[in-house]
């Protein structure tokens, strides 16, 4: 679990339910991926734009892979045995520019940490998803209010799909039904796209004022989990209580909210494990109050 403000990575034993190791001195860590075959742990560091590769047992730093700025989301490409990171590019956050250079890209590296290639993006890439039955990658580019679609086999962009709602940050993929789902902020909502036609087929309302960084599609239950926090009306940067919104997929084009559950302070990120039927939600430390924790939800 990456702790952005604390500049650390927590290694947690799920059976024991406790932290067993803390990796310090990471510059704004954003995401992590552990590869069991090579025993390599990859961590993106947004502050210095790098990806750190550690030994997964000793946690010794093995390599630093440098990118230009704001290394962000990480995904594993199982077909090609590559790790992909989104980085760089112009970025507006909370209505203000945080960076304006136009070198956004998906950086592709092998499991030894060697750079392989990259795919340029129109601005900073946020969440992205990979097809398992095809070769496409779907990339949220909120500054351009679009989903950029590229072919990993050729390294070329093949489409730009306009998104009707703003600030499309998190994304989930329902590959069986050919659907990509993105969550928007301000106003809050879920936009659903047909990955065959590229058309937006549904705009699903969710509670307003929510700030989500992660959504997940549960294929076994035909549900979408929206991990979000509330924000102060006069300052969206000020975190508030977290909520979990559960959306039922009635069919590929129709959805309904079935429940909203409170989570914890500032909880806007998480991880869903389909094999374990568990949803993990991270809360924030409150100033002068309780520390951050990982909440575990059984989704069976």
Image (cartoon, rainbow, N blue to C red):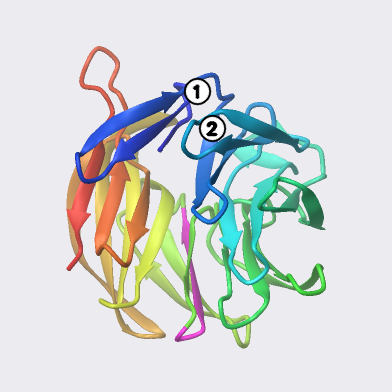
- Decide: few, some or many residues near mark 2? Use Cα within 10 Å; few <14, some 14-19, many ≥20: many
The residue shown at (73%, 70%) is: 152
The answer to the question of whether label 1 and label 2 lie on touching residues, with beta carbons closer than 8 A, is yes
Magenta range is: 176-184
Instruction: Look at mark 1 in the image and give the residue it sits on.
Output: 7
- Which one is nearer the viewer's eye here, 50 or 141? 50
Tag 2 or tag 1, which sits nearer the N-term? 1
* Disc sitting over residue 182 in the figure: none
The residue shown at (70%, 33%) is: 64
Quarter residue 26 falls in = top right
- Residue 71, placed above or below residue 184: above
Rendering coords of residue 115 (x, y %): 79, 49
- Which one is nearer the viewer's eye here, 207 or 50? 50
Examine the residues drawn in magenta and state their main secondary structure.
strand
Instruction: Look at mark 2 in the image and give the residue it sits on.
Output: 29
- Residue 292, placed above or below residue 101: above
Quadrant containing the C terminus is bottom left
């Amino acid at each position: 679990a990456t702790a952005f403000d604390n500049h650390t990575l927590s290694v947690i034993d799920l059976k024991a339910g406790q932290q067993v190791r803390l990796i310090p001195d990471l510059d704004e860590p954003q995401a992590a991926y552990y590869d069991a075959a090579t025993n390599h742990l990859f961590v993106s560091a947004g502050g210095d734009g790098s990806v750190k590769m550690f030994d997964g047992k000793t946690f010794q730093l093995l390599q630093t892979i440098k990118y230009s700025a704001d290394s962000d989301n990480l995904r594993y490409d199982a077909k090609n045995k590559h790790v992909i990171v989104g980085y760089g590019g112009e970025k507006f956050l909370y209505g203000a520019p945080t960076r304006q250079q136009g070198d956004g890209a998906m950086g592709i590296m092998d499991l030894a940490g060697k750079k392989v290639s990259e795919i340029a993006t129109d601005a900073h890439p946020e969440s992205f998803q990979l097809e398992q039955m095809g070769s496409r990658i779907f990339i949220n580019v909120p500054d351009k209010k679009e989903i950029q679609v590229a072919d990993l086999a050729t390294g070329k962009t093949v489409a730009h799909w306009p998104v009707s709602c703003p600030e499309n940050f998190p994304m989930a993929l329902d590959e069986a039904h050919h659907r990509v789902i993105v969550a928007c902020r301000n106003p809050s909502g879920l936009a659903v796209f047909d990955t065959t036609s590229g058309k937006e087929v549904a705009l699903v309302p969710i509670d307003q004022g929510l700030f989500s960084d992660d959504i997940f599609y549960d294929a076994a239950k035909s549900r979408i989990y929206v991990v979000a926090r509330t924000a102060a009306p006069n300052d969206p940067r000020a975190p508030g209580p977290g909520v979990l919104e559960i959306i039922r997929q009635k069919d590929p084009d129709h959805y309904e909210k079935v429940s909203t559950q409170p989570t914890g302070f500032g909880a806007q990120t998480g991880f869903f494990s389909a094999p374990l039927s568990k949803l993990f939600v991270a809360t924030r430390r409150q100033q002068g109050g309780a520390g951050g924790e990982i909440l575990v939800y059984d989704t069976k």
